[in-house]
Amino acid sequence: MILILLGAPGAGKGTQAEMMKNYYALNHLSTGDLLRAALKEGSELGKLAKTYMDGGRLVPDDVILGIIRDYLAAHPDEGILFDGFPRTVVQAQGLADLLTDKEPTAVVLVVPDKAVIERLSSRRTCRECGRVYNPALGIVPALENKCGCGGEIYQRDDDRAETIANRLHVYHTQTESIIEFYREKGLLVEVDGTGKPDIIFNRIKTALS
Ligand code: AP5
């Protein structure tokens, strides 16, 4: 099974991916998490990615497709849940070429811009393990500004107001068109991404059944 989670920044892809990967027994590949890990390591990939991510711009397609090509070669015949990939029609076509005979199902979480702005503004993330905290959902650390793993809790650089606006602009101008790419192929499932996370997860399970 190959699933793709689509949706605006803050649509809840990471939140749903945590539940979906266990339920469907899939490897979870978040290109955003992978790029942030590279950044933390200080690798060449991380340094390159930072120049794009801080401004809310997309990392170039050839870099992302190189990562995906390597991942698929290392995990042949395994179920995968893609989160945050593909983000352009070039990436979607590149994935189709790499998957050859396998067809993915794309699940798009539909959430209005106003709601994603509120979600992203209140998100806090652990610098070490990447766990997401959100007081609006009652997800708060036991100790102030300290994750259960001991890591520091911080606000992602790209979760500041100006960058959120740019990420949304990039989504509407560069990423949204891949919804049509999958719809035309009969590979798209649309899910209302508003409401509580467990209710959305139930909608996803129903839509995929
Ligand atoms: P990435 O890390 O993928 O960011 P994103 O797509 O902008 O997604 P987010 O992680 O911000 O949001 P999400 O949809 O996962 O929502 P979440 O569950 O966390 O990418 C970052 C950057 O990396 C990009 O801008 C780009 O530069 C680069 N990049 C990555 N992939 C790339 C690619 N393929 N090509 C090129 N460049 C790439 O939820 C958000 C918040 O809302 C949380 O606080 C959460 O608790 C809360 N929340 C979740 N669900 C609900 C709910 N139902 N109700 C209320 N609050 C909720």
Image: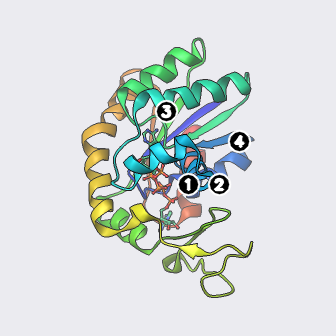
**CA–CA distance between discs 4 and 1?**
15 Å
From this viewpoint, which residue is outermost toward the top? 101
Q: Residue at x 57, y 58 (%)?
A: 15
Judge: label 3 CB < 8 Å from ligand 1.
Answer: yes
Q: Quadrant of the N terminus?
A: top right
Q: Residues within 10 Å of mark 3 (few under 14, many from 20)?
A: some
Mark 1 CB in 8 Å range of ligand 1? yes
Given the image, on which type of amino acid does mark 3 rest?
Ile
Which residue is at the front of the view, 110 or 92? Answer: 92
Q: Are marks 2 and 1 in contact (CB under 8 Å)?
A: yes
User: Which of the two discs, 4 and 1, labels the residue nearer the N terminus?
Assistant: 1
Camera-nearest label, 2 or 4:
2
Q: Which circle, 4 or 1, is nearer the viewer?
A: 1
Of circles 2 and 3, which is in front?
A: 3
Which residue is under mark 3?
64
Circle 2 residue: 18
Quadrant of the rendered structure where residue 67 is?
top right
Q: Considering only vertical position in the picture, is 132 above or below 105?
A: below
Q: Residue at x 38, y 24 (%)?
A: 90
Would you name the residue on which mark 1 appears? 14
Q: Which residue is mark 4?
A: 24
Residue 205's place in the image compared with 100, above or below, is below
Which of marks 3 and 1 precedes in the sequence? Answer: 1
Circles 3, 4 touching at the beta carbon (< 8 Å)? no
Helix, strand or loop for disc 3:
helix
